Image: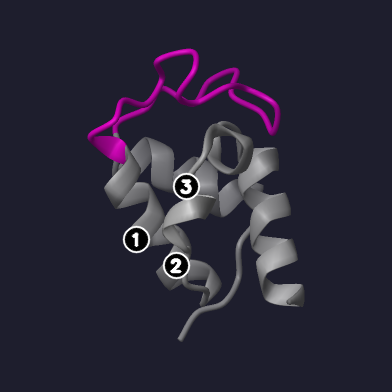
Amino acid sequence: MITTMNTDILLDYLKDRLGVDTDGVDDSTPLFSSSLLDSFSIVELICFIETQAGIKMDAWDVTLDNLDSIGQILRYVELKKAG
């Protein structure tokens, strides 16, 4: 199982699988609140995060605080893996 998650992996996924134009997207770019991603993308993104990082997201963790930017996703994954 792959358990690596970083900015480049997330950018590649957003571009290749979700069709996001990632030019200008960085760790702090809002993904959902800026409409780069829509509600249909969330399930795919969660599945990718779980598989790629080797974690299981709880339903109450599916929030903009955890998923609205690459930086927030990476922080969430780090915290989840820690414990």
Which residue is depicted at the point 41% across and 20% down?
36
Q: Which mark is residue 1?
A: none
Which amino acid type corresponds to the residue marked 3 in the rendered image? Answer: Val
Tag 3, which secondary structure? loop
Between discs 2 and 3, the one toward the N terminus: 2
Q: Which mark is residue 62?
A: 3
Q: Which residues are magenta?
A: 19-41
Residue 21 lies, with reference to residue 60, above or below; the image says: above
Query: In the rendered image, which residue does mark 1 sit on?
Result: 47
The verdict on residue 58 being magenta is: no
Tag 1, which secondary structure? helix
Pointers 2 and 1 in contact (CB under 8 A)? yes
Query: In the rendered image, which residue does mark 2 sit on?
Result: 50
Say which of 61 and 48 sits in front. Answer: 61
Q: Quadrant of the N terminus?
A: bottom left
Task: Give the class, few, some or many, for how many residues have Cα within 10 Å of label 2's Cα (few <14, many ≥20).
Answer: some
Pointers 2 and 3 in contact (CB under 8 A)? no
Query: Which residue extends farthest left?
Result: 40
Which of the 4 quarters of the picture holds residue 46? bottom left
- Coordinates of residue 57 in the picture (x, y in percent): 47, 64
Q: Nearer the viewer, mark 3 or mark 1?
A: 3
